[in-house]
Amino acid sequence: MGALTPFIGILYSALEDANQEATGFILASSKNMEASRVAKGQKVYAPLGDVAEPIEIVPGHTAPEVTEENKADIAEITIEHEKAVRIKLTGNETLGLDASGNYDRVTKAMFADAIRKLNNQIEQYMANTVIAGASRAVGDGTTPIFDTAGELTDLANLGRILNDNGCPDDGRNFVMSNDVLAKLQGKNNILNNANKLGSDDFIRYGMTAPVLGFRLWRSGGLKLHDNSATSTGNGYTLTDAFEIGTTDVEVDAGTGVIAAGDAVTINGDTYMVKEGIDAPGIIKLSRPGLVKAGADGNAVTLINKFNPCVAFHTDAVHLATRAPAVPKFGDLAIDRFLLASEKTGLVYDVAIYPEYKQIVMEISIAYGASVMNAENVAVLLGQ
């Protein structure tokens, strides 16, 4: 019998019954749970096709030459973190729990808390990654989301960005915080009207089938983005004229920091910052870049504080996970197995380590995430 066999039932019960914050980003993203050949810190690249513009066909003796080179763009994903929660039980603690009849209940509670904490870290990491990797945004961070009764304009404007960027209609997701969901539930009577919606799921269960083409999700990882103490960029303007589609935007005539994950407004459109600056230089935007041509001297206005919600296509966001790396000939664990969650789709590595007069059980996972297609990701900036 394996050393972990007595715990398997308790572990799966912990997966089912644990308190857990919402994990909308984990649930709505594309997942690769078998990134077994990828070391921590190693990048895996995926090409994004970008070819020349169409040409007019003119019959002739020879085929026309390619006068414009294909433009290569690359998306990458990295296993950035290997996280573990370790649970220690001494011999005396085991005896006491056995004597009181609480051994299974207490170990189940500890397993559940370990999984909850790992999930929360992954969800928070994914929220930050997706926001910083998005293409464009709507809102200016000063207006509450869904604050007007009976209106879904905020959601419609996110859909307009995805439509402009050519995002497929199927597979769209809208991830919101608990606060925003409460506003949506309390102020949108149309969603509570079964006759108009064709279902009473929203009034009964608080969620419903897709709204304006978006599946609705909640996330405990969406927090107030507040870089106001450190992101102080002010007075920046474009150094030159920039074409539609430009992603490297050079600025001057200003001072201060604009950080990744902040937002900037140029010519009335708002963009998420992929790579920022701390002095005049180049701000990197994600694809598709500027949607309007920029002129020399156009203001670049920083938005460094907002409550975000995110719209994205499932295929645009990838989460890669694996069991943390173990040396070729193993480590000191006497037993280990993989624990799969039906709720999140995540797979955790569970191992047991005997020590002097105590045992340590470890639940761990390695993970990384990336926006593979920024054009299909947009952010709503609320108060």
Image (tube, grey):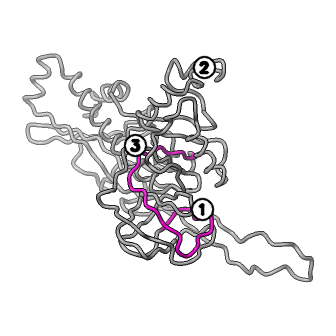
Classify the position of the C terminus by image quarter.
top left
- Is residue 333 found left or right of 323 in the rendered image? left
Estimate how packed mark 1 is, as few (under 14), some (14 to 19) or many (20 or more) residues with alpha carbons within 10 Å. Answer: some
x and y percent of residue 123 in the render? Answer: 39, 43
Front label number (3 vs 2): 2
Dot 2 amino acid type: Asn
Picture quadrant where residue 99 is located: top left
Establish if 151 lies above or below 75: above
Q: Sequence order check: which comes first, mark 2 or mark 1? A: 2
Please tell me whether mark 2 sits on a helix, a strand or a loop: loop
Residue 295 magenta: yes
Q: Sequence order check: which comes first, mark 1 or mark 3? A: 3
Mark on residue 222? 3
Q: Which residue is depicted at the point 9% across and 31% down? A: 91
The residue wearing badge 2 is: 193
Q: CA distance from mark 3 to mark 2?
A: 28 Å
Magenta-tinted stretch: 284-313
